[in-house]
Amino acid sequence: MKGLVLSGGKGKRLRPITHTSAKQLIPVANKPILFYGIEMLAEAGIRDVGIVVGYTREEVMETVGDGSRWGINVTYIHQPEPLGLAHAVLVSEDFLKDEPFIMYLGDNILKQPLSELIEEFEEEKPDALILLARVPNPGDFGVAELDGKRIVRLVEKPKVPPSDYALVGVYLFSSRIFEAARNIKPSGRGELEITDAIQWLIDNGFYVRANVTSGWWKDTGKPDDLIEANRLILEDIPRVIKGEVVNSEVRGRVQIGEGSLIKDSVIKGPVVIGDNVKVINSFIGPFTSIYHDAVIEGTEIEDSVILKGVRIKDVPGRIEGSILGNETVLLRRDKKPRSLRLVLGDHSIVELQ
């Protein structure tokens, strides 16, 4: 079985962060989102992985490489325009050929071994096996109507949902999906929808089976979801201190990378701090990730995602629930304000008065 990871799209819901960076490469708990899916495929024994790339292809290719770090072979597949998930399947046909495959949306993070899904697919031999999750807001997702384990209908963002089972973004297909994708028409937004292709399989008598995830799942396409995914992953990190800690208190599950300096500060886990980071006279609170080369001085931060090379100095109040893009500079001039909630794009500079 081959793997197919989708890493195209423009990440409009995460702007301004994604104006200058691929959404799938934003680090969550200091690891690019895309890496979580690739790791899961590798752990499930998938060795040939195609990655569908679009306008950020050069950045994705440079970051992921040839896949050797995970013991897999990566093939890059260019999708010139983001014309839908079913279109991504069609442009990947030469790579996938007539083999069954597992498709994983590259901006999703999932806590469930993919090997369980692959085993079920190989035993039951459906034409499609779709991973579902129960959600409180099914109207925001593609939703499945079930008859036992069989999916009988899919509805995209229904006003009156037939169930609370949302499509997670992990699909296993036989080669019949190519026939289905060729027989559907673009949706109202001009895309070939994978839900329409799956519905074509259902309508033409093919077996489409559901699997309901036993773990948590996050689509990281929105800032709040990305921050929540960061929290969920940090819950499980081990304590690893590689940097230097001077006159500071480090509590709980905290990771500090090589070349980093924590001085005159309090770090309260779960927190992950990357390489070559300086934290001076600051408080870093739970559920915060700080990527490489950042400098934090005289500041309190909690429940936030801080990207590469960020500089923060003497910010009043506490930064909470925020995402700061690469190379952001946050400085204090005078006093004000007491609280901050920020989503800043790469290379932003903010001076607080």
Image: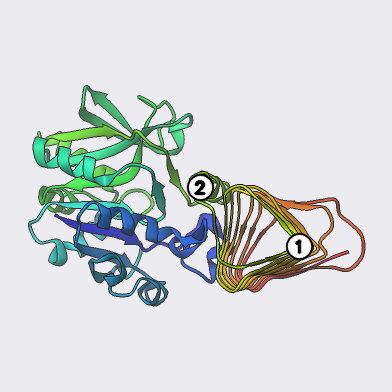
Question: Which secondary structure lies at badge 2?
Answer: helix
Q: Is residue 177 left or right of residue 111?
A: left
Spatial separation of the CA atoms under disc 1 and disc 2: 32 Å
Residue 133, visible in the rendered structure:
yes
Image x and y of residue 303, in percent: 64, 49
> Which of pointers 1 and 2 indicates the residue nearer the eye?
1
Q: Residue 48 shows which numbered tag?
A: none
Viewer-closest of 321 and 223:
321
Task: Give the class, few, some or many, for how many residues have Cα within 10 Å of label 1's Cα (few <14, many ≥20).
Answer: few
Q: At 34% from the left edge and 33% from the top edge, which residue is drawn?
A: 214
Viewer-closest of 29 and 244:
244
Residue type, numbered disc 1: Asn
Q: At 69% from the left edge and 50% from the top edge, which residue is drawn?
A: 285
Name the residue that disc number 1 marks.
247
Q: Is residue 64 above or below residue 107?
A: below
Q: At 26% from the left edge and 46% from the top edge, which residue is drawn?
A: 114
Image x and y of residue 91, in percent: 21, 64
Q: Is residue 302 left or right of residue 118?
A: right
Name the residue that disc number 2 marks.
229
Viewer-closest of 157 and 41:
41
